[in-house]
C-alpha cells in the first residue's frame, strides 16, 4: 500500500513531466488511412482531415497539448456525431487553452499517459466531452480504437462506442487545476482516469451530466448513451482509484430540469469548501420540472469535509422538484460543518437522501457561519414544498459535536420521514461549540415560522446511545402536526448526560411547541431489550404552549416494551398537554424489572408522568404498566395530574411485586376535575415504606371534583405502621373516592381516618365520604361441627369392656400424640386464643376383664397414613390372648 508521501512524490513527478510537455504542439502520428492535419507550430490550431466511418470521425496524434490561451479547433463536417481522438505517443496532454468542435458533435479525448487541464482550459463543443486515460475505445462489434496499439479503424467502427478499456496496471490520472470546463445544456462532461483530481475551478453541465470515475487496474468500463447523456458503468470487481475535489471547486448541473452528478471511485474526497450542486435553477418556470440525481459509489470511503457541501436543490425563484442524493460506500464521513441534502428555496419538493454504508457513518465538527454538519432535506424560508425522506443504512452511525440528520421545514410544507437501519450501534453525543445552541439530533420538524406537518422517524438498531443532551425528535414549533417515532432496539437503549450550555437532557420526543399550532403530538413506540435513562433523560410526547398564545391539540401516546427499564437521576417518561387538549396515554410492558431511583441536578425525581397544565381544557392521559417487578424509590412517581379543568387519567399496574420506598408515589391529582382511578391487579406483594403512598386526590384548589377510586386485587399489602405510608382516595368538595381491596392479608395500616401512622382513607372535606371495602378470604365458623343429639346418653354404656393385650402386644403397639398449637392462632387474621388447660373432672371408668368381648363399639387401636398422606385413626385390634 502506498503511503501518503509516496503518492505525493508520484503526483509531483507527474506534474513536472506535464510542465515540460505543456509547450508541445499538436502532432499527428500518421496511423490513419486519412491522417489528421494541423499546421506545425501553431498556437491557435485548426485540425483538419481524420478518417470518417459513418457519423464517426477518428483523429490520431503522437502528441496533443494546447498551450496557455491557445486553441485546438476540430473542423468536422455537420453530419459528424462523434469525434474520437487518441494520443499514441508518450507525453501527457496539457490542455491550458480552448478545445472547440463544430456543430453538435461529441468530443472524445483519449491519452493513456495522463491529461491535465490548466486554469485557462475551456470547452466550446456542441455535444458531450469525454476525457479518459484509458488505452482504447471499444465498439459493440468488438473492434477497438486503441492508443497503445494504434491500428487503423475498420469500416465497422461506424456506431457509437460502448466501452473504454484499461490495459495498464496503474492507469494515469486526470487533473483539473482550476479549469472551467462547460458543455452545452443537457450534455455530458466525463473525466475517467486513474485518480481524478479537481483542484479548484468549475465543471459545468446545465441540465446535463458530470461524471467522474477512477480506475486502478486493467479492465473494461461500460459506456452507453441514454438520450443526450453518456453514462459510465464501472464493474464492482474492477479495482478503483481515488477521486478528489478540493480548493473551492464547483461541480454544477443546475438548470430548468434534469442534471445529474455521478462519481465512482475507491475513495471520494470533497474538501476545501468545495460544492457539488444539482437541481432547478432560478430560470425555471415549470411546475412539473424534475431535477436529476447525485450519486456516489465508493469502494472505501466518502469524505465530505472542511465546509464542503453536496446539494440537490430548487434555487430561489425556481419552480420544480429537486432530485435525490444516493451514496453507496464502505464508510462515510462528514466533518467541519459540511452538509449533504436536498433543499428547496423556491417552489417544489425536495428529493430523497439515501446512504447505504457497509461499515461506519460518522458526522462531526462545526464550521464557520453557524455551519453545523448535516445530512437531510430542507424547505427553507419562502420555500414551498414537501421534503423527501432521509433513508440511511449502516453497520454503525455516530453523530458528534452537534451534528444532525433530519428533515426540516422553515417555509411551508410537510417534513419527510427519517428512516435509519443500523446493524450495530447508533450513537449521538457531543455539543456544538460555545456560542452555538444545540446538541446532536436526529429529527423531523417544522420550525417556528414554518407551516406543515412533521415527518416520522423510524430507527432499527442493535443499540442506541444518546449522550450530552442529544435527541431523537419530531417537533412542530410553527403550525402543524408532529410526526411519530418508532424505535426497534435489539439490545440497549440508553439516554444520559446534559447539554451543559443549554441544560438540555438527552431525549426522545414528539412535540407541538407553538403559539398558533392546531395539531396533535406524535406517538412514540419503542421495543428494546433494555432501556436505561439517567441524568434527567426523558421520553415525551407533548403539546406545549407557545409564547404568543395557546396551542390546540392532543399529546400523542407512548408505548414501550422491554425486558427491563431503569429510570435514574431524575429521568422520566411523560405525556403532556399545556395547550388546549388531552395528554397522551403511556403504556409500558416490561418482562422483568421496572425501576426508578435518584434525583437530577435540580433535585427532581424520576417518574412516569401524564400532565395537563393550568388553564387548559383537557384530560390527563392514562398510565398502564405491566411488569414482573416494579421498584420506586427516592420520591419516584407514577403520576397522572390535571392542573386545568379536566379529569386526571387513570393508572393501572399489574406486577408480581410493587415496592414503593423513600416517599415514592402512585398518584392522580386534579385542581377541580375528577381524580383518576388507580388499579393494581394480580399483585403478589404491595410494599409501602418510608412515607410512600398511593393516592387519588380531587379538588386541590379547594374546588369540586370527586376523588378517584383505588382498587387492589392480589395477595398481600404491607406497610410499617410508624412510617406514615398511606393509601388515600380524597376530595375537597366532591365525593371521596372508594378504596376496594381484595387480598389475603393486610399488615401495618389503620383505616378510616388520617393519622401520622400508615393509613387507608377515603374522605372528602366538605362532600360525601368515600367507602373502604376489604375483601378477605371467606371463613365459615361452623365448618367441621356436627349437630349434637337431643337425648342425653349415659357415657358408661358407650364404654367397651375389652381384653387386656398380652405383654408382647403391649410392647409392639403404636402410639399417637396430640400436643396442640402451642398458643399459635389457626391463621394470621384470627385472634390469639387462651392456652388454658381444660380439666375433665368426671370419674375414671373402671376396667375389668370379660370372657365375652363386645364388638359393638371399638375404640381406636392404631393409626395409618392413607394414599393422600393423611393420618387416620383405625379400629383394627391388636392380637389378644384372653383367659391366660
Image: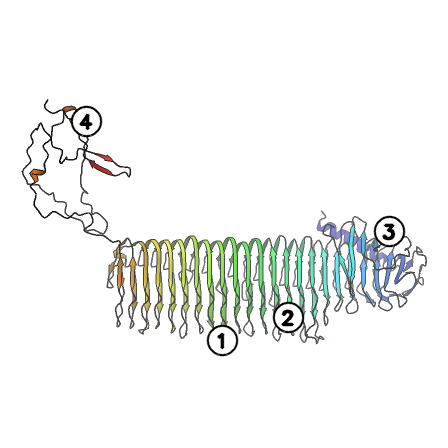
The residue carrying pointer 2 sits among few (fewer than 14), some (14 to 19) or many (20 or more) residues within 10 Å by Cα, namely: many
Label 4 Cα crowd, 10 Å radius (few <14 / some 14-19 / many 20+): few
Task: Rate crowding at label 1 as few (under 14), some (14 to 19) or many (20 or more) other CA atoms within 10 Å.
Answer: many
Given contact means CB atoms under 8 Å apart, are the residues at marks 4 and 1 in contact?
Answer: no
Would you name the residue on which mark 2 appears?
349
Label 3 or label 4, whichever lies nearer to me, is: 4
* Sooner in the amino-acid sequence: mark 2 or mark 4: 2
Point out the tag, 3 or 1, that comes first from the N-terminus. Answer: 3
Residue at label 4? 812
Marks 1 and 3: in contact by CB < 8 Å? no
Return the residue at label 3. Answer: 148
Query: What separation in Å lies between label 2 and label 4 (alpha carbons)?
Result: 104 Å
- List the residue tagged with mark 1: 515
Residue 480: tell me if it is visible: yes
Secondary element at image label 3: loop
Front disc: 4 or 1: 4
Task: Report which quarter residue 306 is drawn in.
Answer: bottom right
How far, Cα to Cα, is label 3 from label 4?
Answer: 120 Å
Question: Helix or strand or loop: what does disc 2 sit on?
Answer: loop
Return the disc, 3 or 2, that comes first in the chain's sequence. 3
Amino acid at each position: 500500500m502506498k503511503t501518503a508521501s509516496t503518492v505525493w512524490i508520484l503526483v509531483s513527478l507527474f506534474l513536472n513531466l506535464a510542465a515540460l510537455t505543456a509547450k508541445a504542439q499538436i502532432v499527428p502520428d500518421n496511423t490513419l488511412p486519412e491522417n489528421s492535419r494541423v499546421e506545425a507550430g501553431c498556437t491557435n490550431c485548426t485540425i483538419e482531415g481524420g478518417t470518417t466511418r459513418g457519423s464517426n470521425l477518428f483523429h490520431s496524434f503522437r502528441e496533443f497539448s494546447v498551450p496557455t490561451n491557445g486553441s485546438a479547433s476540430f473542423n468536422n463536417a455537420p453530419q459528424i456525431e462523434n469525434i474520437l481522438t487518441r494520443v499514441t505517443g508518450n507525453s501527457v496532454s496539457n490542455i491550458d487553452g480552448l478545445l472547440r468542435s463544430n456543430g453538435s458533435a461529441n468530443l472524445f479525448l483519449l491519452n493513456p499517459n495522463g491529461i491535465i487541464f490548466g486554469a485557462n482550459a475551456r470547452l466550446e463543443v456542441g455535444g458531450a466531452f469525454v476525457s479518459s486515460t484509458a488505452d482504447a475505445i471499444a465498439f459493440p462489434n468488438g473492434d477497438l480504437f486503441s492508443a497503445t496499439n494504434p491500428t487503423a479503424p475498420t469500416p465497422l467502427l461506424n456506431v457509437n462506442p460502448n466501452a473504454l478499456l484499461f490495459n495498464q496496471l496503474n492507469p494515469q490520472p486526470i487533473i483539473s487545476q482550476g479549469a472551467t470546463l462547460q458543455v452545452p445544456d443537457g450534455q455530458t462532461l466525463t473525466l475517467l482516469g486513474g485518480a481524478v483530481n479537481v483542484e479548484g475551478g468549475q465543471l459545468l453541465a446545465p441540465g446535463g451530466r458530470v461524471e467522474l470515475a477512477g480506475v486502478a487496474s486493467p479492465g473494461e468500463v461500460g459506456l452507453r448513451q441514454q438520450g443526450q447523456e453518456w453514462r459510465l458503468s464501472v464493474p464492482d470487481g474492477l479495482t478503483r482509484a481515488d477521486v478528489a475535489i478540493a480548493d473551492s471547486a464547483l461541480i454544477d448541473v443546475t438548470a430548468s430540469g434534469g442534471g445529474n452528478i455521478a462519481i465512482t471511485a475507491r475513495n471520494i474526497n470533497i474538501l476545501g469548501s468545495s460544492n457539488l450542486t444539482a437541481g432547478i435553477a432560478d430560470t425555471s418556470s415549470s411546475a412539473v420540472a424534475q431535477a436529476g440525481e447525485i450519486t456516489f459509489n465508493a469502494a472505501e470511503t466518502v469524505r465530505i469535509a472542511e465546509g464542503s457541501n453536496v446539494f440537490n436543490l430548487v434555487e430561489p425563484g425556481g419552480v420544480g422538484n429537486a432530485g435525490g442524493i444516493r451514496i453507496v460506500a464502505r464508510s462515510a464521513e462528514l466533518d467541519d460543518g459540511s452538509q449533504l441534502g436536498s433543499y428547496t428555496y423556491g417552489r417544489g419538493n425536495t428529493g430523497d437522501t439515501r446512504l447505504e454504508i457497509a461499515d461506519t457513518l460518522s458526522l462531526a465538527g462545526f464550521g464557520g457561519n453557524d455551519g453545523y454538519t448535516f445530512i437531510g432535506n430542507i424547505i427553507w424560508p419562502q420555500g414551498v414544498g414537501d421534503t423527501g425522506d432521509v433513508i440511511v443504512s449502516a453497520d454503525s452511525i455516530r453523530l458528534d459535536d452537534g451534528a444532525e440528520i433530519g428533515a426540516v421545514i422553515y417555509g411551508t410544507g410537510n417534513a419527510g420521514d427519517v428512516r435509519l437501519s443500523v446493524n450495530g450501534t447508533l450513537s449521538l453525543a457531543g455539543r456544538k461549540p460555545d456560542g452555538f445552541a444545540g446538541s446532536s439530533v436526529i429529527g423531523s420538524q417544522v420550525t417556528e415560522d414554518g407551516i406543515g406537518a412533521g415527518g416520522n422517524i423510524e430507527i432499527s438498531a442493535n443499540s442506541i446511545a444518546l449522550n450530552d443532551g442529544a435527541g431523537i425528535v419530531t417537533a412542530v414549533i410553527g403550525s402543524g402536526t408532529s410526526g411519530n417515532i418508532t424505535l426497534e432496539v435489539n439490545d440497549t437503549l440508553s439516554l444520559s448526560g446534559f447539554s451543559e450550555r443549554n441544560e438540555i437532557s438527552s431525549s426522545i420526543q414528539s412535540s407541538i411547541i407553538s403559539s398558533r399550532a392546531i395539531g396533535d403530538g406524535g406517538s412514540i413506540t419503542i421495543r428494546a431489550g433494555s432501556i436505561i435513562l439517567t441524568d434527567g433523560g426523558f421520553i415525551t410526547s407533548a403539546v406545549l404552549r407557545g409564547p404568543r398564545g395557546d396551542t390546540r391539540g392532543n399529546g400523542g401516546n407512548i408505548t414501550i416494551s422491554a425486558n427491563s427499564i431503569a429510570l435514574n437521576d431524575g429521568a422520566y417518561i411523560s405525556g403532556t398537554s399545556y395547550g388546549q387538549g388531552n395528554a397522551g396515554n403511556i403504556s409500558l410492558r416490561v418482562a422483568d424489572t421496572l425501576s426508578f431511583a435518584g434525583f437530577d441536578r435540580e433535585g427532581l425525581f424520576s417518574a412516569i408522568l401524564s400532565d395537563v397544565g393550568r388553564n387548559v381544557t383537557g384530560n390527563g392521559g392514562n398510565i398502564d404498566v405491566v411488569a414482573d417487578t416494579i421498584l420506586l424509590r427516592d420520591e419516584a412517581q407514577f403520576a397522572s395530574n390535571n392542573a386545568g379543568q379536566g379529569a386526571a387519567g387513570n393508572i393501572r399496574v399489574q406486577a408480581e411485586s410493587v415496592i414503593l420506598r423513600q416517599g415514592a408515589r402512585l398518584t392522580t391529582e386534579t385542581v377541580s376535575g375528577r381524580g383518576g382511578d388507580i388499579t393494581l391487579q394480580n399483585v403478589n406483594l404491595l410494599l409501602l415504606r418510608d412515607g410512600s403512598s398511593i393516592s387519588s386526590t380531587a379538588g386541590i384548589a379547594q374546588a369540586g371534583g370527586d376523588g378517584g377510586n383505588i382498587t387492589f386485587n392480589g395477595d398481600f399489602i404491607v406497610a410499617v405502621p410508624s412510617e406514615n405510608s398511606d393509601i388515600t382516595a380524597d376530595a375537597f368538595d366532591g365525593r371521596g373516592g372508594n378504596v376496594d381491596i381484595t387480598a389475603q392479608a393486610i399488615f401495618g395500616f389503620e383505616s378510616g381516618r388520617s393519622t401520622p401512622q400508615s393509613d387507608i382513607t377515603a374522605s372528602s372535606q366538605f362532600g360525601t365520604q368515600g367507602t373502604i371495602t376489604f375483601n378477605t378470604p371467606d371463613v365459615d365458623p361452623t365448618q367441621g361441627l356436627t349437630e349434637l343429639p337431643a337425648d342425653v346418653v349415659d357415657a358408661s354404656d358407650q364404654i367397651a369392656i375389652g381384653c387386656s393385650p398380652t405383654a408382647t402386644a403391649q410392647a409392639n403397639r403404636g402410639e399417637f400424640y396430640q400436643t396442640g398449637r402451642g398458643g399459635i392462632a389457626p391463621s394470621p387474621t384470627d385472634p390469639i386464643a387462651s392456652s388454658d388447660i381444660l380439666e375433665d373432672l368426671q370419674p375414671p371408668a373402671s376396667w375389668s376383664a370379660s370372657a365375652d368381648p363386645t364388638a359393638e363399639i371399638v375404640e381406636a387401636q392404631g393409626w395409618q397414613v392413607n394414599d393422600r398422606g393423611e393420618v387416620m385413626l383405625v379400629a383394627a385390634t391388636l392380637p389378644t390372648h384372653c383367659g391366660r
